[in-house]
Image: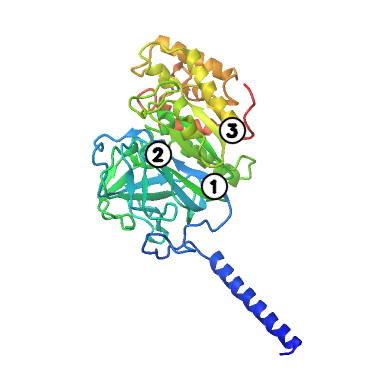
Amino acid sequence: MTKRHGYAVLSALIALVAAVSAAIYLTVAADDGTPRGALTDGRPHHGSSVAPASTGTWVGAWSASPVGGEPGTETGGLAGRSVRNIVHTSTGGTSARITLSNLYGHEPLTITHASLALSAGDGTAAADPDSMRRLTFDGATSVVIPAGEQIVSDAVRLTVPHDSDVLVTTYSPTPSGPVTYHPHARQISYVADGDATEDATGTPYTQQTPHWRYLTALDVLSNEADGTVVVFGDSITDGVTSTIGANHRWPDILAGRLRTALAGGRQVPRYSVVNEGISGNQVLADGLGRPAENQSGLGRFARDALTHPNVKAVVIDLGVNDILRNPRLADPDKIVTGLRTLVREAHARGLKVVGATLMPYQGHRGWTPAREAVRQQVNTEIRAGGVYDAVIDFDKALRDPYDPRRLRPDYDSGDHLHPSDLGFARMAGVFDLNTLKGAGQTEL
């Protein structure tokens, strides 16, 4: 073979390798995330929908704090049943992953099947069948979560729109309790007998529940958001009196305001919003049990506020339960000191902290003139600027102008403590989006 012929053959081989490589690249790049078959050991084939297919930033799209162990599940848990949680996204993305918690379990929790899908949009347990994705954990379809711990799934490729409902379903075949849950979801979720994890019709899901179970976070790989805002609070943040299924909690509306402002060309941060409110939560005091149910703000802040992906800012609306639930008269200095401790923890991570004044509640059964004086003292400290980087004055925005110790009647849900849907809208409406810009102060 002549030298010239040898060069020609070598050039042809190089061209062939380049063509094959290009074809492989284009095939992978064009993958739309449709699930492929799994190997017999439960691990997906290479090139499946597990790895993210596009660039972006991981942010929180939804969250709920673990609150305690669900009564009635202490022994059997939810063995032999599929739990389909319905959650609502604050931002969109091209891939998604979830966090499951066994914080309050007394034994390991075995999940043998889990899925994620977009809702069919009819308010039932039905899913968009084309969006159904089987979830894996470190490549396997089964996972065991030790008591007191949590697990993050592998990412799956799926276009998740903002302001949409997502169905996250888990199946556990064996008894394991208590079930870690969030009781005041203000959203109906579903349960089915047997393994109906990838059922898209919703027909087997004949049982309804007002709780979120096991699921504590949904993250997305987003091109819409560059960071996460965590709203940290009590039942007012939890939205306990908002309309069920309407997503009228004030953090939901805040997320919508951010999206609308960006779409209108305003120079506001590109942030998602997640809700870490717990009804009855206090800055200082834990609930009962080990681990403590309804753990104090001080105790849960690192877990619930600081561990979300790309957290940029924390909004704190906490303190009224320290006044209401204290059997003696609460010490305003201790409440303010506790709030400052939370701010220091956030500042150690370089985070901006926006804080809210405590809203009025005269007419509620727990109100007394002495407790009102404590609320006023805490608010005076907050307004003075020595607690937070920036202040949102919810007290001023929602109080009755004719009796500032009360909520304005149309902002009152009727219990004189929690806002109505209109009140929640007012809270989000008066929130200055520009306060979310920048990092936290070094020292207050």
Q: SS of the residue at dot 2?
A: loop
Q: Find residue 135 and report its horizontal and vertical position in percent.
A: 41, 54
Q: Find residue 179 and report its horizontal and vertical position in percent.
A: 31, 39
Q: Against 52, is 403 above or below?
A: above
Q: Find residue 22 and report its horizontal and vertical position in percent.
A: 61, 71
Question: Which callout, 2 or 3, points at the residue further toward the start of the chain?
Answer: 2
Quarter of the image for the N terminus: give it: bottom right
Q: Which residue is mark 2?
A: 149
- Residue 226 visible (yes or no): yes
Q: Nearer the viewer, residue 184 or 261?
A: 184
Q: Against 393, is 327 above or below?
A: above
Q: Find residue 131 and report its horizontal and vertical position in percent.
A: 42, 58
CA gap between label 1 and label 2 equals 22 Å
Residue type beneath disc 2: Glu
Q: Nearer the viewer, residue 12 or 436?
A: 12
Residue type beneath disc 1: Trp
- Residue 425 visible (yes or no): no
Q: Residues within 10 Å of mark 3 (few under 14, many from 20)?
A: some
Which disc number belongs to residue 58?
1
* Left or right position of 10 against 231: right
Which disc number belongs to residue 349?
3
CA gap between label 1 and label 3 equals 17 Å
Callout 1–callout 3 Cβ contact below 8 Å: no
CA gap between label 2 and label 3 equals 23 Å
